[in-house]
Image (cartoon, rainbow, N blue to C red):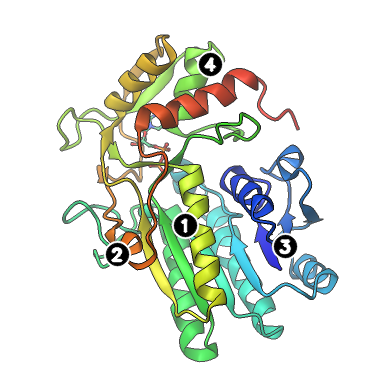
Amino acid sequence: MILVVGGAGYIGSHMLKLLRDQQEPHVVFDSLENGHRTALQSSLFVQGDLRNPDDLKRAFDAYPEIDLVMHFAAYISVGESVREPGKYYNNNTAGVLNLLEEMKSRGIGKFVFSSTAAVFGNPQYVPLDEVHPKGPLNPYGHSKLMVEQMLDDYDVAHSFKSVCLRYFNAAGADPDGVLGEDHEPEEHLIPVALLAALGRRPTMKVFGTDYDTPDGTCVRDYIHVLDLAQAHLLAVRHLRAGGDSRKYNLGNGEGFSVKQVLETTEKVIGREVPKEYGPRRPGDSPKLIADSSRIRQDWGWQPAYPDLEQIIDHAWKWRLAHLEGFGD
Ligand code: UDP
């Protein structure tokens, strides 16, 4: 049985859908601080917080069949991490340490970890492959890179096997329209643009127009949330087959500037996105584009939804049908 930590959140809830489709036994652990009860649907659920070891004990005690853990329960806003680093290290790093210790004490040594392109920082070359030097520019990236290091050390000391999946920019939604991206406050580019287009906020800010990129705005590689979930499934199979520890970059290998994303959004939704141009957001890397050839070669991972227009269209369909988000 898989313990899905943070399964009520954006990426976690898409993962749950895939696990249910695959009839893969699982139980969700989530504090519901940012997750949504509605997103859990029929999955088993334990409410608890990673920062509280007793909550973790309760979950593992209740489901002794757990043999593998997936972790999605992180704070994810670059800007907020610069303003409140302690919050990020406490949850994203110390919280995961609690989880690893609990797993170790029970002899559970299979872990799939949601890492991030933010571990790289300023690119020395693009696209970024797995061996590109690491140099996070913000506490969010540091909080994740520290866990990658812990996992290396746990492997040496305890034969603990992990797969770190470094997401580039997760976006989109399941096209069936039930699940979507609903953060409070929302700080990510595509959902913010959609909310602005809907008049749910007066305008949106483009953070920085003086980067060393073709149009001066930051470049990112947007990857569909279902393609991320699929990579997790491959990781589960690898670990269950006795596989070794791995790290993979997950993206489409194509970079889009903030301006290009907004133009594409306007084209897809047929509305204008009200925007203002402002200063840089502290902690942002100018350009993050993935080289995902390693996971493609090793496991045959192949994004099913690589097209940015389709990614935005799926996000838009969900938002139009859920103007108030999940409402829970
Ligand atoms: N961005 C922006 N305005 C916003 C939100 C994001 O200009 O309201 C930019 C941000 O500076 C970055 C890109 O959009 O260059 C993607 O940011 P996001 O927060 O979505 O993801 P991140 O790359 O930080 O994980």
Which residue type does callout 1 highlight? Answer: Ala
Q: Say which of marks 1 and 2 sits in front.
A: 1
The image position of residue 158, as x and y in percent, is: 55, 89
Tags 1 and 2 touching, CB below 8 Å: no
Name the quarter where the C terminus is drawn.
top right
Q: Find residue 201 and name its label.
A: 4
Cα–Cα gap, marks 3 and 4: 40 Å
Residue 114 rendering spot, x and y as whole percentages = 50, 58
Q: Residues within 10 Å of mark 3 (few under 14, many from 20)?
A: some
Name above or below for residue 13 compared with residue 235: above
Q: Of tags 2 and 3, which is closer to the observer?
A: 3
Residue type, numbered disc 4: Arg
Of badges 2 and 4, the one in the foreground is 2
Compare marks 3 and 1 and give the one earlier in the sequence: 3
Instruction: Return the residue at label 1.
Output: 231
Give how far across and how far down residue 272 sits, in percent: 40, 9
Task: Tell me which label, 1 or 4, sits earlier in the chain.
Answer: 4
Instruction: Check disc 2 and give the amino acid type.
Output: Glu
Residue under circle 3? 25
Secondary element at image label 1: helix
The residue under label 2 is: 130
Q: CA distance from mark 2 to mark 4?
A: 38 Å
The local secondary structure at tag 4 comes to: loop
The residue most toward the bottom is 157
Q: Quadrant of the N terminus?
A: bottom right
Q: Residue at x 54, y 60 (%)?
A: 233
Amino acid found under the numbered disc labelled 3? Pro
